[in-house]
Structures are given as structure tokens and as C-alpha cells.
Amino acid sequence: MISINRLLIILLLISMQLFAQKAAFKLVPLGVKGGIDEKNLSAYLVAPIHTHDFICLDAGTINDGIEKAVANKVFTVTPSEVLRKYIKGYCISHAHLDHVSGLIINSPADSSKTIYATKKCMEMMEKHYFNGETWANFGDEGMGFQLKKYHFQTLIVNEETQITNTTMTVKAFALSHVNPFESTAFLIQNGNDAILYLGDTGPDSVEKSNDLSLLWQAIAPLIQRKQLRGIFIEVSFPNEQPDSLLFGHLTPNHLMKELHKLEELTGRTALKNFKIIVTHLKPPTKNIVKIKEQLQKQNDLGLELLFPEQGKSYEL
């Protein structure tokens, strides 16, 4: 005969399962590192759960990541079909090569879709890459003969934009990546659910900026309402890297300081078990290992730290 206490525990576990938050997004990293590994640079596919309507957040590596995902049976179609049919568009945080090279190289094999970026980022891409000289202009704006495969959609900061051929929207926020060079954070929303992706960013204290503080203020209510499913944010160097050599990036120390600023807005309990997807770890391997160890040791907020691997599938 089941005791009353045991019965209560069983009922509690059942109720927890019933009320557990179901996944809202599927994540497939095509590239996760910063630095010199050209086969594994920043690019993250995100789609509403149970769909193949992916937006690609940055595009440093495309083909190698898709091939790994297919090999891992994340996708059951050919790499070409993933590229042409599943990826509905690209959100580019800034125009540094490690965030756009996959997009450029794969453009001849790609299908028609939209590239989303802020004005300065789009101008750099049109001037330096899709200009008819460095590379054919596959877009519908800019210099050289316009092949019009890609629609260049300029995002206005803090304004919501529909992502074509999906149910998702994107809102851009300014980031500082070696002030005054701009990077971008993207708030991707699908109904009541959202994820936040940050391109390269330095800490406010080093960048002499308030961009991260303004971003935390904007997204804190979403965390409190349990609508934000996770934050993608970079940690490029271990704590031993001096501030003078950060080059617009974060260390574990600086990330945790920033997240404590966020905690002041949300309250501590709101961040417990909240997902932080750590991006842009720079080689060599010993530095990546050190970054992970330092983050785990300094995680006094009870965060769920996720270190995504190329070509694997995750749910948020």
C-alpha cells in the first residue's frame, strides 16, 4: 500500500511534468567558435519547434555545419535542400568575416531569401563584399550588377520586423564591438516565445557604452514572464586576458558582471535555471577548456550554461 507521503511525491512529480514549459524553438548550430577555425565559425539555425522554418543567426560557417548536422541525422534531407529550403533568411550581427564568410561563399548555391542587418552592417556588406568586384552582387541593392537573389532588408534598431516565410519576427538592438564599431543583438520572437542572440560585444565598462544595460532593461520583462527561452552570448577569452586586449569581447568575469546587472532587473529567482548559450569561444583548445571551467565556477546565479556543439540539435 502506497504511503500518503509517497503518494504526495508522485502527485507532485506528475504535476511538475504537466506544467513543465514545453520547448518553443529548435536550435542547430552550424558553427560555434570565434577565431581561426574556418570550418566552425558563428552560425546558428533557429526555428519554431516542429518546423523547418529556420533563420540563420550570423553566417560564418554554413556548408560544413549543415553537412555535420546531416551526418548526425538532425536533418534527413540533403545538405543542398537544407541550404535552399530550410534556411529562410539570415540575420547578420556585423560584417566581420568570421560572421559572414559562409554566407558569401555559399551564395551561388543558395536560393532566393532575405538578409537582415542594420544600416551600417548592410552598407559594409554592400561596399566590401557584394560589390561586383570582391564578389558578385547577389543582392538587390548596392554596387555592381544586381543579381537580386537576396533581398537586403535593413533593420531599424528597436523596431520589430517580420521574418519572411516564417511566423517569427526580429528586433535589433545596438551593441558595441570595439567602440565605435557596431554589432547587433537580435530578439527573435514567435508568438509569446522569444530567444535573444548577441553578436560580438564588449562589456559596457570597457566599451564606455550603455548598450548592454539598455538591452537588459528591454528584455528583463520577458524573463520575468518566462517568455525568453535563452540568451546566446559570446565569451571569447578566459579571465587572464587583459581588458586592453579584449578587442570588443567578453571574458567569464565580464559576462557574470553583466548578468548580475540583468539579475538586478529580473530578481534572482527569475534567472535560476535560465539558459545561457555560450558562443564564440576562441581557440586554442586550452583556452576553451579554461573558459568553460571559469564560467562553471563563477556561476553563482544558478544559470543553465549550454556550450553548443556544431551540427547537433537542441530545444529551447
Image (spheres, grey):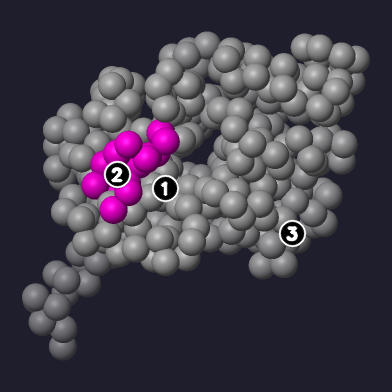
Relative horizontal placement of residue 58, taking residue 315 as reference (left or right):
right
- For numbered disc 2, what is the local secondary structure? loop
Q: Residues within 10 Å of mark 2 (few under 14, many from 20)?
A: few
Q: Is residue 245 above or below residue 132?
A: below
Front residue of 19 and 119: 119
Q: Nearer the viewer, mark 2 or mark 3?
A: 2
Q: Position of residue 100 (x, y in %)?
A: 66, 35
Q: Amino acid at mark 1?
A: Ser
To which residue does mark 3 refer? 67
Q: Position of residue 250 (x, y in %)?
A: 35, 41
Q: Is residue 123 above or below residue 207?
A: above
Q: Is residue 205 above or below residue 295?
A: above
Task: Report whether residue 27 is seen.
Answer: no
To which residue does mark 2 refer? 242
**Magenta stretch, main secondary structure class:** loop
Q: Position of residue 298 (x, y in %)?
A: 20, 56
Q: Which mark is residue 236?
A: 1
Q: Residue at x 16, y 88 (%)?
A: 1
Front residue of 191 and 54: 54
Residue 210, by quadrant, is: top left
Front residue of 72 and 36: 36
Q: Nearer the viewer, mark 1 or mark 2?
A: 2
Q: Nearer the viewer, mark 1 or mark 3?
A: 1
Q: Is residue 66 above or below residue 147?
A: below
Task: Report whether residue 83 is seen.
Answer: yes
Q: Residue at x 79, y 54 (%)?
A: 79
Q: For the magenta stretch, what is the residue range?
A: 240-254
Q: Which mark is residue 39?
A: none
Q: Residue at x 58, y 13 (%)?
A: 119
